[in-house]
Image: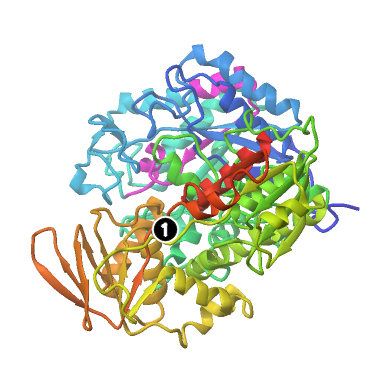
Amino acid sequence: MPGNNFPKLLEPALIGKVRLRNRIIKTAQGSSVIEPDTGFVGDRAKAYYETLAKGGVGLLIVESCGVEYPLGVHHPPVQFRLHDDDLIPSFSELARISHKHGCPIFLQLFHAGPWNPTGLLVRPNARCSSVLTKAEMPGPDFVEAKGMTLSEVKEVIEMFIKAAERAAKAGFDGVEINAGTCHLANSFLSRVFNHRQDEYGASTLENRARFVSDIVRGIKKRIGPDFAVMALINIVEYGNERGTTIEEGVQFARLMQDAGVEAIQVRAHYYGHRGGLLHPDRFYYPELPRPLLKGLDWNRSGKGVIIPLAEAVKKVVSVPVVAAGRLDPYLGEKLLNEGKLDFVGMTRALLADPELPNKVIEGRLEDVRPCLGCLYCMDVRLHNKPVLCRVNAQLNRERELTYQPATKKKRVLVVGGGPAGMEVARVAALRGHKVTLYDRERRLGGLLPLAALLKNLEVNEIMALIRYFKTQFDKLGIEVKLGREVNSSLIEEARPDVLIVAGGGKQTITDIVGIDRPKVMSSDILHRKLKISLRFFSPATLARLTRLWMPVGKRVVILGGRIQGCELAEFLVKRGRQVTIVDSVDALGDGMTGDDRFQLFPWFVKKGVKRLLGVTYNEVTNKGLTVTTKEGKELTLEADTIITALPLQPNTKLRESLEGKVSETYFIGDCIDPKLIADAIAAGATMGNFI
């Protein structure tokens, strides 16, 4: 019977009096899908959350919703807020849609307090438990805070209670109080912020917990026992001597239970690290820092790092305990059976594939689209744009990319087995077209295997993505012909109704004097050598072998400081090379997520990677590369090997060779507009939905 391998994960369970159909919880994450001008729930938000609800998740927790606006949110005007009764009818649509698909729905309530991780909003009157100047704050992602008077504390507690009342009137089954990370509620729990001397002060654990406890008691008293209340709290805080200890965090959980919460979601925070410990897997990029944070589980590349905290809390409470952090169905089932947690929290995995729960139920794990753990979703959202996913082009385009059956079935020939080609083939076949995919290489993926090699952190996920496409091709009857270059005679023989060219871009050629010297290696040549090796070794194996030998000298100058050059530099530094990055542009890391830049650039400094931007290239000599800095100084950068790592250019030659061969011909992806993986997959999905 399908789902037999996950009996505990798929077991119905209760949070308070709310029955969940399984133990998978879609944890709250900002999406920026609310209507910005009004705060109403519009079509975009309805489509986004309906897709998650009908995907089979046990509980849907709608993202961080401000109880005060705009002072209480990080992302105005695109962040959820329920500070006014006028919003109740709009929010009721979310509850109705979720219930229509048999999914209970909670609303996470929070107040931003002094935390300002995006830097998007200047809040001169930011609320905090105590008066703290910006210099006194535990890092750069905070604004100067105005300490709250006792009457203001009571006022904000009432804001939370009234927001919960509105959620109940809108039809929500419960709320989660976000008192974790560095939000306002945590500023009472944590001695990092709380310097108060009254009953909400830091003198006792009960006083520190009183702000959240009063909110919980107020909600239960005002709404009644049928409306569930969860609390999300930091069980431990690192990076600050005044941070919450594990012993204190466990007792906070007990106090939350005493106040009336029906479930506790555990979290940890690390002051001084971007995002704290929201995404612990990212601690492994570019290298896992030493010493490791104590009390956590670092044995699975970041998956389930905070599970020891859930275990500790479960020893002192009787209500269910929830944990998240790159958990998957297999690990979730294992942890549930071991009694280490009661519910499995997921977010990024469900953005990559909202149907994950249903596929687990149906025994179709091979059909789950893997999350790359890349945080592209968060990077988009940190720019106040609706959340997107690198591998799931339908996310936030659910109404646009419907993948309805084609009215006229066609023979489709796809040229190129990279991300754009694979996705257009998959979507076209899903809609009923007869698809054949050709690629001149001997393996699918285009540049993805090379990306897996360079991005060692994501090697398993990237290769899992290629396996996912192969599985879908088999199930959809897509014919794949590798090692075959498409030309006029092949097209005449195949006689397709539609030709879709999704070939790769071409190498950018630089006209620097001496660029043809033997010590210069274009990224195209490097790619070719690595591709040959990839015929015999997996990316993971080749990554290990290149630590022993590769055809690159000890001193390397990389021409290009955008994503291509930075990732190549990281790869080479880890293999003992002395690296200098140069570029004619002034910005480093264009194309990388903000999270990656934040972690990689200090690592470059630590590893001695030199970076020269805004230079003029002069000449490649026997010694290396001569450049003129933007200050007008001429330098010779000594190098054994010089590698060009510049963005690709459109492949006009490929386009010219195939244009007009079939009456219905389309060009997508790098061959016309070289960009990133997310752009390639989105282009493939859009074209597959169109033809």
Q: Determine whether, in the image, residue 63 is placed left or right of residue 332.
A: left
Specify the amino acid type for callout 1.
Thr
Q: What element carries label 1?
A: loop
In the rendered image, the residue lying farthest to the top is 86
Indicate the position of residue 96 as horizontal and vertical percent values.
68, 21
Q: Residue at (26%, 38%) from the top-left corner?
A: 130
Q: Determine whether, in the image, residue 408 is placed left or right of residue 567.
A: right
Viewer-closest of 350 and 523 = 523
Q: Is residue 356 above or below residue 216?
A: below
Q: Residue at (46%, 45%) from the top-left corner?
A: 378
What are the residue bounds of the magenta stretch?
162-191
Q: In which quarter of the image is the C terminus?
A: top right
Q: Does residue 425 show up? A: yes
Q: How crowded is mark 1: few (under 14 residues within 10 Å), some or many (20 or more)?
A: some
Q: Determine whether, in the image, residue 45 is placed left or right of residue 150.
A: right
Viewer-closest of 600 and 309 = 600
Q: Residue at (83%, 52%) from the top-left corner?
A: 3
Q: Name the residue under label 1.
A: 245
Indicate the position of residue 15 as horizontal and vertical percent values.
68, 39
Q: Is residue 200 above or below residue 540?
A: above
Indicate the position of residue 437 as horizontal and vertical percent values.
71, 55
Q: Is residue 670 magenta?
A: no
